[in-house]
Amino acid sequence: MTTLIAIVVFAVVALVGWCLAEGKAKWFVYENNEQEEAVLEQNRRQLEQNGYTELNIKDVMRMIATTGYSAV
């Protein structure tokens, strides 16, 4: 009987913890201030000047070795 009570208590505590974790993301939203926005914009401009392009999965697959390593 005590094992069953322990399992139920554990499940209730787990569900409450899960609900709090999910709610935290909805209730407390982080927003960048003006200084952080300026830094992010400056970094974006520098990346564009240096020729940065975001790779898709096909580009990444071409760049890395997907067939394995040959020791010979």
Image: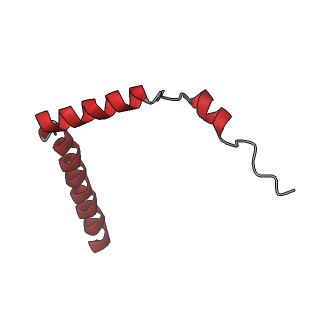
Q: How many marks?
A: 0
Q: Residue at x 28, y 57 (%)?
A: 11
Residue 60: x and y in percent read 60, 34
Residue 33: in sight, yes or no? Answer: no
Image-quadrant location for residue 31: top left
Q: Nearer the viewer, residue 63 or 14?
A: 63
Residue 40 or 7: which is nearer the viewer? 40
* Above-or-below relation of 17 to 52: below
**Farthest residue in the right direction?**
72
Q: Position of residue 29 (x, y in %)?
A: 15, 38
**Viewer-proximal residue among 3 and 33:** 33
- Residue in view at x 26 percent, y 56 percent: 14
Q: In the depicted view, which residue is nearer to us: 41 or 29?
A: 41
Residue at the front extreme of this rendering: 49
Q: Is residue 37 visible?
A: yes
Q: How is the image coloured?
A: secondary structure
Which of the image's four quarters has the N terminus?
Answer: bottom left
- 15 w.r.t. 38: above or below: below
Residue drawn 26% across and 60% down?
8
Q: Quadrant of the C terminus?
A: bottom right
User: Going 36% across and 31% down the picture, which residue do you hit?
Assistant: 46
Residue 42 image point, x, y percent: 27, 32
Judge from the rendering whether residue 48 lies leftward or rightward of residue 11; answer left or right. Answer: right
In the rendering, at what x and y percent does residue 18 appear?
A: 25, 50
| Vertical placement of residue 2 versus 67, above or below | below
